[in-house]
Image: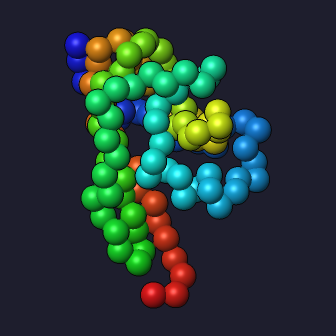
């Protein structure tokens, strides 16, 4: 068991989800981690909003991975996987902890 290294990770839109819908953005705070087939690969998972200001939202994801690979998808119900995290390497039993920062703008 090791901690997954996200120092070179890439977060990108999954092919086929462009243009994205409002829900694809808003569901980031409730996503599970899945493989390309849509099978959930994490356990003991939590998503926490650690920053919530008019200009920035930061989401902390933590948990344990149940399979090995080099990429995963942020998964929502209905096999929706609009976000892909790649350029990483993990094994079953590894723990993960990463933050997604979202810059926001609009009326405050």
Q: Count the marks.
A: 0
Q: Residue at 29% x, 18% y: name it.
A: 94
Q: Which residue is drawn at 47% across and 31% down?
A: 33
Compared across the picture, whether 100 is left or right of 3 comes to: right
**Residue 87 visible here:** no
Q: Is residue 41 left or right of residue 38?
A: left
Image location (x, y in percent) of residue 80: 65, 38
Residue in the picture at 62% in, 52% down = 24
Q: Position of residue 12 (x, y in %)?
A: 59, 41
Residue at the farthest front position: 78
- Kindly give the residue lying farthest to the bottom in the view shown: 108
Q: Relative to 91, does residue 14 appear above or below in the rendering?
A: below
Can you say whether 52 is above or below 107 in the image?
above
Q: Is residue 86 above or below residue 74?
A: above
Q: If the image is split into quadrants, where does the C terminus sit?
A: bottom left
On the image, the x and y values in percent for residue 27 come to: 53, 52
Work out whether residue 104 or residue 79 is closer to the camera in this orientation and state it.
79
Which quarter of the picture shows residue 51?
A: bottom left
Q: Which residue is drawn at 42% across and 13% down?
A: 67
């Amino acid at each position: 068991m090791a901690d997954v290294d996200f120092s070179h990770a890439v977060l990108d839109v999954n092919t086929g989800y462009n243009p994205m819908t409002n829900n694809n953005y808003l569901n980031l705070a409730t996503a599970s981690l899945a493989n390309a087939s849509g099978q959930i690969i994490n356990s003991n998972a939590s998503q926490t909003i650690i920053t919530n200001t008019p200009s920035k939202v930061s989401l902390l994801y933590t948990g344990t991975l149940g399979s090995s690979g080099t990429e995963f998808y942020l998964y929502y119900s209905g096999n929706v996987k609009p976000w892909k995290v790649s350029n990483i390497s993990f094994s079953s039993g590894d723990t993960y902890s990463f933050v997604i920062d979202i810059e926001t703008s609009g009326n405050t």
